[in-house]
Image: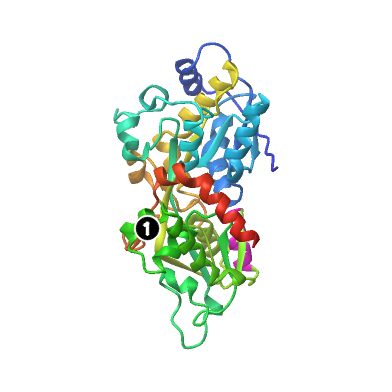
Amino acid sequence: MNKIKIVSTVSALSLVAGMAHADGHMASDMTLVSWGGAYQQSQINAYTDPYTAMNEGVSVTWDESSAEAVAKLRAMNEAGNITWDVVDVVAADALRLCDEGLAMEIDADEQLAAAPDGTSAEDDFGDLLVGDCFIPQIVYSTTFGYRTDMVPDGVAAPSNICDVFDLETYPGMRALEKRPINNVEWALLCDGVAKDDVYDVLETEEGQERALAKLDTIKDSVIWWSAGADTPQLLADGEIFMGSTYNGRLFAAIEEQGQPIGMMWDAQVFDLDGWIIPEGLSDERKARALDFVYFATDTQRLADQAKYISYGPARLSSAPLVGKHASLGIDMAPHMPTDPNNAANTFLYNYEFWADYRDDIDAKFQAWLAQ
C-alpha cells in the first residue's frame, strides 16, 4: 500500500458544502482508493492537494487496490469493518457494488456541485451517470502501445486491433490485462464477429469458448498484467513489443518520459471511471467523504485533472476549461481518447453486460489461464 499523508488550512467553501451534506462533525482523515501511477498522481494534484490545502488538519491515506475493490469491499462488509472512505472504480464495478448494497446511493443534484452557470449536476454529467451509486470523473480508453523501434523492417507500424493476434507479421511478447474484459471483445472482433454483435455472441457458452480459443492463439506470447503501470514499464524495458493499458499511462510514457512508444487507437474501448462511497461508514466519515466528493467532482477540479493526464473530464462544463499540460505546455485536447482523430473506430463497453456476467466469465477466464 502506498500512503501519502497531507495536511493543510481551512476552506469556508468546503465547510459550507459539508454542512449541506451532513449534520455534525466530519472525520479528520480519509482513506482514498485508486490505481497508483500517473493516474493517482493526477488525482493528488487536482483533488487532494487543493482539498487538504483548504481543510486544516485533514489527512489523506492512499490505497492502490482499485483493481480488487469489489472483492475487498465484499470482505470488509462480511467482517463488518469498512476501512475505505472513497473508492475509485470503473463503472461496471460500481454497478455491481451498488446492486449488492455495498455502495451508497447518490442524489446528483443534492450531493454534487452544480455547473458554474447553474446547470444541475445531473444535466452536466448527463448520460455518464450510469448508476445510482456512481460519481463519474473521467472518460478513458483501454488501447495498445507498441515499441516503435521493434517494428520489423519493411513492415508498417501496427494500426489495426487484429495486429495484436498477428504473431507472424508482428512477432514478440504482448501484455494483456489479467481479466476477460476487453480481451474477449477484441478476440471476437478478430475472429470475425461484427462489432454490434459482440455482446450477443458473448452471452452464449459457445461465444465465450470462441473468444478463449482466439486468445489461445497468442497465449504463449502474453504477459498478464494487473496494474495499469505494468504495460508502460514492460514497454520501457523492451520486454514486450505491444501491450494494452489505459491511454493516460501511454501518454505519460510517450510525452512525459520520451519513451520510443507509439499508440494504436483502433478499437480502443471507451470506459468511465469514478468514485463510490462504501455503505457502512460512520456519520462523521460519511460526511467527510461526501464533502470531498462534492469538491473533487466540481467543474474546475475535473478540468484540472486533464492538465496532468489525457483523460476526458466527465462533466460537459469541464471540457471548455481543458487547456495545456501543467508542465509540458502541450495542448491536451489531441491526446484525449474522445478526439475525433483518435475515435474513428471505438468499441463501446457494455456496463450492464459485465455487471450481469462478470463473475461467471471471470471464473471461466481464470480457469483457462491456469490450463
Please determine whether, in this image, residue 362 is positioned above or below residue 369. above
Q: Quadrant of residue 111?
A: top left
Residue 48 position, x and y percent, is 56, 35
Is residue 114 one of those drawn in magenta? no
Residue at 44% over, 63% down: 186
Density class for disc 1 (Cα within 10 Å; few <14, some 14-19, many ≥20) is some
Residue sitting at x 43%, y 81%: 156
Q: Point out residue 204 in the picture as x, y percentages from the top left corner.
A: 42, 54
Q: Is residue 119 left or right of residue 354?
A: left
Asked which quadrant contains residue 61, the reply is top right
Q: Give the magenta-colored segment's residue range.
A: 227-236
Q: Secondary structure at mark 1?
A: helix
Q: Can you identify the residue that label 1 sits on?
A: 198
In this rendered view, identify the residue nearer to me: 344 or 252. 344
Q: Is residue 365 above or below residue 50?
A: below
Magenta region, main secondary structure: helix
Q: Position of residue 183 (x, y in %)?
A: 49, 60
